Image: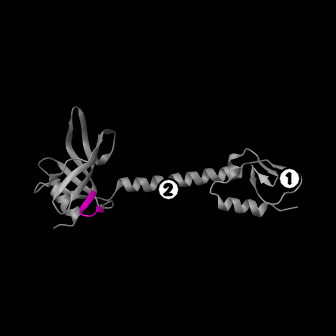
Amino acid sequence: MVNAGPVVAKMRATFALPRQLFCRQAIHNHSTGTICGRPVGGAVSGREIHKGPDIHREEAIMRARFLFLTLAIFVGAAWAGEWTLIKDNAKSGEKTYLDKSNVQRIGPLTRIWSLTNYERPSGVAGRKHMSEKALVEFDCETGELRKLAFNWYSLHDGEGEQVYSYSDLGTKLPVAPNSAEEAAWKMACGKK
């Protein structure tokens, strides 16, 4: 008689989600040497049915929960970002921040997320919002910028309902002097 235990244990270690998870009953057919249709070793006469709690299924559920929570934490941390205040305009009530933890550099181009909070609701065509998150691309050599995407939110800090979302390559514009964009360009490109 062949002991299939080590072979099954090796299968569990080899496959993240073992085949037994998909079987209501793990059937070990000794005459064909299979469990749920997969080979497990030498053939032996007889047939054995393993009944009882599906421990493998419970393990897979726990793994899936752990993976989901881990991804949720990392995605949330990436979206939350490391926001640094770069411009506080007392006259307009706008405060602009940059996410320094998520800077992408491609040659002379730098992409970075900005967050702008408005003191009073802002918007166009009835789409009022209190904050905007935008993916901005700066050309560090020419001093130009363009918005690649932006999202408007009903509350400050990109919270609340997403009121509007847009993405496009946008038109390159010169960075205006003494503006939030200039402060962002200097920080993103390492200018002084």
Name the residue that disc number 2 marks. Answer: 70
Q: Is residue 106 magenta?
A: yes
Real-space CA distance between mark 2 and mark 1, rounded to the nearest whole angstrom: 43 Å
Quadrant position of residue 140? bottom left
The amino acid marked with disc number 2 is Thr
Which numbered disc covers residue 31?
A: 1
Location of the N terminus (image quadrant): bottom right
- Sequence-wise, the earlier of marks 2 and 1 is 1
Q: Which mark is nearer the camera, 2 or 1?
A: 1
Q: Position of residue 79 (x, y in %)?
A: 37, 53
Residue at figure coordinates x 64%, y 54% from the top left:
17
Residue at figure coordinates x 61%, y 50% from the top left:
61
Which numbered disc covers residue 44?
A: none
Number of marks present in the image shown: 2
In the displayed structure image, the side of residue 111 where residue 12 appears, left or right: right
Q: Is residue 141 magenta?
A: no
Residue at figure coordinates x 71%, y 63% from the top left:
10
Q: Position of residue 112 (x, y in %)?
A: 28, 57
Question: Foreground: 179 or 109?
Answer: 109
Mark 2 is surrounded, within 10 Å at the Cα level, by few (under 14), some (14 to 19) or many (20 or more) other residues, namely: few
Range of residues picked out in magenta: 105-111
The amino acid marked with disc number 1 is Ser
Quadrant position of residue 16? bottom right
